[in-house]
Amino acid sequence: MGRIFLFGLALLLAGAFMAPSVLGSTLDDVRKRGELRCWVAPSLPGYAFPDKKGNWSGFEVDFCRAVAAAVGVKVKFDPSSPRDRFNSLALGSLDIMTHATWTISRDTRLSTDFVAVVFYDGQGFMVRKSLGVDSAKKLNNASVCVLTGTTTELNLADYFRSNGMKYRPVVFDNPIKALKAYDNNRCDVLTNDASGLAARKGLLKNPDENILLPEIISKEPLGIVVRHGDKQWADIVRWVHNAMIIAEEKGITQANVERMARTSKDPEVQRMLGKTGSVGKDLGLSSDWALNAIKAAGNYGENFARNLGKKSKIGLSRGLNRLWNKGGLIYAPPIR
Amino acid sequence: MKKGPRFKPSAPLNTFWRDPDKRGVVYQVLIFSLVLWLGYKTFRTTLANMAAKGISSSFDFLNNEAGFGIDEALPIPLLRGGIAYFIFALAFGLMAVFLLARWRASRGKTIGESTPLVLLSLALIFFLPVLVLHATYDTIETETYTEASSYGSALIVGVLNTLKISVVGCILATVLGFLVGLARLSTNFLVNKLASAYVEVLRNIPLLLQIFFWYFAVLQTLPSVRQSLTWSNLFILNNRGVLLPSPHPTQWFATTLFLSFGVIAGIVLLARHAARVKNLTGRQVPVFLPSLALLAGVPGLAWWILGPPVTFTYPVLTGFNYEGGIALSPEYASLLFGLTVYTSAQIAEIVRGGIQAVPLGQWEAARSLGMNEWQLMRFVVTPQALRVIIPPLTSQYLNLTKNSSLGVSVAYPELVAVGGTAISQSGRAIEIIGLTMAVYLTISLLISLAMNWYNARAKLVER
């Protein structure tokens, strides 16, 4: 029956025996537990992918590691179906959720808040070369494998509707099943965030026989989400992200962060790394929060290069995800 | 400080507490109130908890645009125009026959004893609704689900898809289950062992694994669209599913249908005549072959004289996929195969148990009365076996219906799958789970109701 029903039942049963309660401070809960619970995309190489021994690696995995290091706890990754993730977060069984497209309805209607965009993406289509299609405009009547509960499911409907085309959705609850069904030729098209398609292409039987169509049909700002109403926790997560961006701007890396903390003459770096000022204390953390975060995951650019960049297996270019002063959209407010 | 006994021999005892019946009522009222109170408390606390977490509860979202697509969405019949007339006629027919039966019962008789009343009942239940459907055919309205339809429509499509798999699955599982159950009682070594192997293997493998097996191992390894296996253009099989020609009624469809009703009435008359002759004289009037001849002959003659009652549209390869015809998706097929095969193994055991529950003496008695094997099964074994079979068979139907929710794992858009999508797109978890539970409860109660009615008819009538 799936997690969604267990969740509903548990909620009803819990409801019978619990007095009305308000969730407490996430920071206190995480510290008490000694563990940060972080939702990551199930099996998405480059973003979150476990190796055979169960060691996780990926861009968003490393972001969660940075937050955990800033707080001073361990981290646990939850790769469950994307269908239930917003509810799990709203009810407090997750602390952070990654890889969710920021939309107005998710921000306002659901009991969750977006705190940062860590990756600017767009939705694309993957097809087999043998289909002889070079544009998404020629996909009339195609079967499309898509994931339930994603913005891509809705964008897909909008795109075909606005172009006066028909399509046949085959809707899966798990990205690996969708990929397998596409690989078995159940669908003509697989749709997802373009970077996600590029990342999963390597998992297909014959990766080189598949191409991404040139159309990018949506804006997919992949954000970090926390529970609505806990301002302190939202601040912590947002500023860990900002600290990683500022670190890239200032040339602070995983390797030199300790030395920079001691020797840097830049007042902003001194404030960020805890030599002066009280930003750590203001966040409710220790003064070396940013130092620990960068030591754990590196700066934004290092994290990108290690997991997604040209030299990694995924081979993405920075594109929109370059720093603001290099023609991209990645920008952090000052630490002051 | 014990007080002296205030015992008055003449005083009446407190009879209320001494009466076990009255005491029982009090206990039941107490327990019922406790359950009600717990339910109310749960409801209130859940609402309060949701409010505390900023989750509001309302069913307004059902009218909002869903925005996602559903493949194989059946047209949604709207409850006005032709459909409403049809339901009204059906309800009227059933009600009338029910009242007729009550009236006959009050006189100590049944409908079955009077041939005109049997024909009238058939006409009320079958002929009248179909006639109304025919007369109001042009006023039937349906909604075709699109991305622009509402969440409510999406959920109704889910309910229809659940019904589509459950009804077909129950019928197929029953047929297959009875066949295998009978095969297990066969004295033929090979048939017997094959049936035993079928039952033991299939009921001991988890259903979800079987569905995955059909979906990923069988149906997705079929050839692709362009290399479809075809048998002329009547049957096309590929890894996108099975395609069959779809029938469309012509102007002569209604005429042929009503002629068929006439044929059925004729067969009823013939059968009753044969039964009467047999009671009076013991002579067997042939029924089966003449009935078959009438059933095939009259519509056949109508076809020959007037023209075909239906025409067919054949699937045609256009672009990526076949268009037109009836398409059974691999998602539907794998779920149907999985549910049917798994449940049929359970039903086979129920059938075997039911037949073996008929004492051996009954078989021997029937044979010594000179009954042939058909009569033995029809008049002695089946009626007694059905009493044992029906209650567990009902549970199997309920199981199959609820197990159809596994369709979500192979992308079949039944209620749980569509509900799951609707939850994640609208965020209305409590409302949609509540609706889903209510729908399953309703379907299950309707199945139970129908089967209990049948059970009441089949069970031992003590005279």
Image (cartoon, coloured by chain):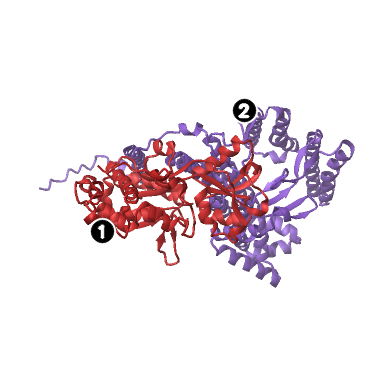
Chain colours: A red, B purple
User: Pointer 1 indicates a residue of which chain?
Assistant: A
Q: Residues within 10 Å of mark 1 (few under 14, many from 20)?
A: some
Image position of B311 (left or right of A187): right
Query: At numbered mark 1, what does the secondary structure look like: helix, strand or loop?
Result: helix
Residue B66 placed where, x, y %? 52, 36
**Residue situated furthest right in the rendering:** B305
Residue B346 seen in the figure:
no
Q: Which residue is mark 2?
A: B80
Q: Residue at x 89, y 37 (%)?
A: B305
Residue A91 placed where, x, y %? 35, 45
User: Pointer 2 indicates a residue of which chain?
Assistant: B
Residue A273 placed where, x, y %? 24, 52
Q: Residue at x 31, y 48 (%)?
A: A243
Residue B79 seen in the figure:
yes
Quadrant of residue B296 in the image? top right
Identify the disc placed on residue A258.
1
Identify the disc placed on residue B444.
none
Q: Are marks 2 and 1 on the same chain?
A: no
Q: Nearer the viewer, residue A156 or B260?
A: A156
Q: Residues within 10 Å of mark 2 (few under 14, many from 20)?
A: some
Q: Nearer the viewer, residue A293 or A258?
A: A258
**What number of labels is visible?**
2
Q: Cα distance, mark 2 to mark 1?
A: 75 Å
Image position of A13 (left or right of B323): left
Q: Residue at x 40, y 38 (%)?
A: A107
Amino acid found under the numbered disc labelled 1: Glu
Amino acid found under the numbered disc labelled 2: Arg
Query: At numbered mark 2, what does the secondary structure look like: helix, strand or loop?
Result: loop
Residue B284 placed where, x, y %? 83, 52
**Residue situated furthest bottom in the rendering:** B189
